[in-house]
Amino acid sequence: MASTGNETGNQRLEPRIVAFFCNWCTYTAADLAGVSRLRHAPNARVIRVMCSGRLDPQFVLDAFARGADGVLVGGCHPETAITWKGTTRRSAGSRLLQRMMKDMGIHEDRFHLEWISASKGKR
């Protein structure tokens, strides 16, 4: 694996974050942040998904298995979601995912679910 310049020996200076962003809200907010020339975290890798509620929990576990230090799932607010049913399912699925992570020895603070609407680029 090639060095990214952020590594000293076996220690990384910044955590590797994988972010799964909903196409309709959170990804649009991230795009707004870019257009507004706000800084993005250089250690985060964004993966665009159509709906956070349709995100397979295995993708989150795979991110951890491949070396992610943290995973962020960003989706629409449940009351404004394009696919309200999917967002509600994601909220329930995240609780199950957190139990699975605990059983696997992955600390719950390494996973975060956040509702970020399209107009919240700064967030």
Image: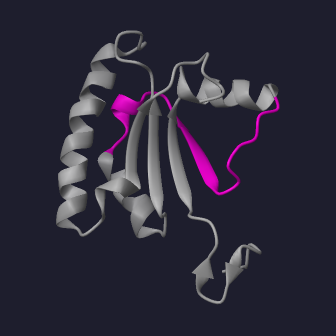
Task: Say if 52 sits above or below 57 in the image.
Answer: above
Residue that appears at 65% across and 57% down:
43
x, y percent for residue 38? 77, 34
The image quadrant that residue 40 belongs to is: top right
Stretch of the chain drawn in magenta: 37-56
Which residue lies most toward the top here?
80
The answer to which of 122 and 59 lies nearer the viewer is 122
In the picture, the quarter occupied by the N terminus is: bottom right
Residue 51 vs residue 120: left or right? left
Task: Say if 10 sits above or below 27 in the image.
Answer: below
x, y percent for residue 121? 65, 25
x, y percent for residue 29? 62, 25
In magenta segment, residue 61: no
Residue that appears at 44% across and 21% down:
76
Task: Say if 62 sits above or below 51 in the image.
Answer: below
Residue 80 vs residue 13: left or right? left
In magenta segment, residue 40: yes
